[in-house]
Amino acid sequence: MADKHLLETVDVSEVFGGLKAVSDFNIYIDKGELIGLIGPNGAGKTTAFNLITGVYKPTTGEINFDGKSLVGLKPYEITQRGIARTFQNIRLFSELSVLDNVKIAYHCHVKYGLIETVLRMGRYFGEEKSIEDEALNLLKIFKLDDHAYEVAKNLPYGAQRRLEIARALAAKPKLLLLDEPAAGMNPQETQELMEMIRWIREQFGLTVLLIEHDMSLVMGICERIYVLEYGIIIADGTPSDIQKNPEVIRAYLGAEAIN
Amino acid sequence: MNSARKKDLVMLVFALILYGVLQTMISAKIIGSFWELNIILICVNIILSVSLNLINGYTGQFSLGHAGFMAVGAYVGVVATVKFGLPLIVALILGAIAAGILGFLIGLPTLRLRGDYLAIATLGLGEIIRIVIMNIDYVGGAAGFKGIPHLTNFTWVFFVMLMTLFFIKNFVNSSHGRACIAIRENEIAAEAMGVNTTKYKVMAFTIGAAFAGVAGGLFAHQFYLISPTSFTFLSSFNYLIMVVMGGMGSITGSIAGAFVVTFISAALASFPEARMIIYALALILMMFYRPQGLFGYMELTNVGPIKKFLNKVSGAKEVST
Ligand SMILES: Nc1ncnc2c1ncn2[C@@H]1O[C@H](COP(=O)(O)OP(=O)(O)OP(=O)(O)O)[C@@H](O)[C@H]1O
Ligand SMILES: [Mg+2]
């Protein structure tokens, strides 16, 4: 149990009423890796994210990040420790501008206090300026700079998904969790998104864990993949291992072929 | 100089001009004592609506107990001046602190509640504050507190109002204010972006309560007598109407709301029945045709020509506030 992994879950389980949504969940992620988490609908993928980010408290088990336990921390504390996420069902600040959506996420890096805020002195102007510059820069990376002053809810679907990633990056995480980032995107958008995820990982020195149903995306960019079925990890390995694994073909690819 | 600061300065100049004009008209008796009183009430109500807007509009927490905090500020204020002979400014500060502390203590447990439940809880607590005051003989009980010196005037309320507006404006246009707005927009996402949602809900509630306390202190020293009946849930409801009418999440809106509501009440003072009907009709029409309130999330300083003018005088390129 070496604690040099960036993230490690040990025998984590989550029970809702009588339903074991996740059980004996053991994964690890090393710094700089790009890992995929796949599995059929209802397998427990989003639940795993909610456990890591503190939305749910594990019924049993340990989650360690950067050598420290995350169990029992509030979601905002986990974000401050360096984990940011996107949501499967988009959760933007929909009435606010695209720029403000991103600016909010710098929150835990702001140092000016209440007095500096109210009197507009000290670090206020300097920090506000750098937040604005950094936010605009992120929007440029995600090709959203032309929409910076538009209301977030008016963006097309694909752009909303990109905005969620931009917003998560503004929290300056070490580990980025993406819950179906390509859902609802057309093949060309998906392709662009893949490039973007690769690029931001290099650029920001990120570690990424992503849930995705789009097999071409997962197989195309992930270095290792975990496969979840009925809350249990049934396989893990490189994309080519996974593609050959008969369990996976039965559970996941088989299920998809029927659809 | 920084362009945001220059913009503040321009606004300050406009405020001073407005003050000068009104004060001259009051001194020259062009504005009679009835309308002078109502102008003062408009200023007090602006403090109340803007501070309530911080809680209800910006942070999205439905509070209906504002009159209770106002009462705390009023009573602490008059005790300070009458019983202890302290100056008005100290009385206002003590009232703010007392209301703020009470807001903090009430906010901590109740802000776990959501929507309707929070509204009912704050409504109840506002009434409890009032009934507690009613039973304290030291401050006159149900009969009210008599013999309050008339320490306020237009100058006092105008400048305290101005200070309140600057405080709240600067607060909402900062990372702290953005945290509050994020809670209103999507609490789960706000938490996921590193916002301590409990802390900011309580903070907004405490600041809002403290300013309601300031307004209470000003209000009390305008009259010879205050009594618990001035702070019933109907007044809380009245401040809520100002906020909703003006626009939840707009400071300009709260100013407009306080102005319109106070003005209509004053203009129809001799027809109390008609007043309630007009009030109700105005609200119903509003909900049909402009549910977001007069200003919605807009600020007057962001409206086309005004924004252009402000940018020109302050030399800013892009406005983000
Ligand atoms: N809060 C909850 N309360 C009760 N049951 C829940 C809760 N959240 C998830 N579940 C159940 O847990 C199981 C796993 O759900 P989860 O959302 O994690 O699946 P998923 O792998 O993300 O699926 P999808 O691909 O559809 O997003 C499902 O059966 C779901 O109904
Ligand atoms: Mg899911």
Image (cartoon, coloured by chain):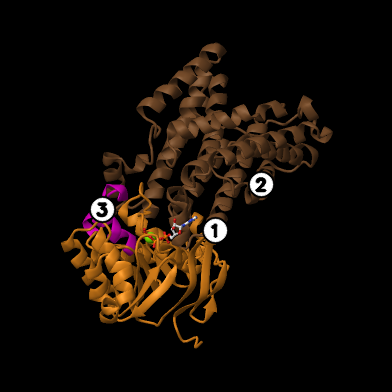
Chain A hue?
orange
Viewer-side label of 3, 1:
1
Figure check: B262 above or below B116: above
Locate residue B101, reporting x and y percent: 67, 49
- Considering only order in the chain, which callout, 1 or 3, is on the residue closer to the N terminus? 1
Q: CA distance from mark 3 to mark 1?
A: 36 Å
Figure check: A181 above or below B278: below
Q: Are marks 3 and 1 on the same chain?
A: yes
Residue that carries the numbered disc 1 in the rendered image: A18
Ligand 2 image position (quadrant) = bottom left
Residue that carries the numbered disc 2 in the rendered image: B106
For the residue carrying disc 3, how many other residues have a C-alpha within 10 Å: few (<14), some (14-19), or many (20+)? some
Q: Main secondary structure of the magenta part?
A: helix
Residue that carries the numbered disc 3 in the rendered image: A157
Bounds of the magenta segment: A145-165
The disc placed on residue B76 is none
- Side of A174 where B204 appears, left or right: right
Q: Residue at x 76, y 34 (%)?
A: B133
Q: Nearer the viewer, residue A142 or B165?
A: A142
Figure check: B268 above or below B262: above
For the residue carrying disc 2, how many other residues have a C-alpha within 10 Å: few (<14), some (14-19), or many (20+)? some
Question: Badge 3 sits on which subunit?
Answer: A
- Side of B233 where B255 appears, left or right: left
> Quadrant location of residue B72?
top right
Q: Nearer the viewer, residue A209 or A225?
A: A225
Q: Nearer the viewer, residue B189 or A133?
A: B189
- Magenta region includes residue B13: no
Question: Which chain did the renderer colour brown?
Answer: B
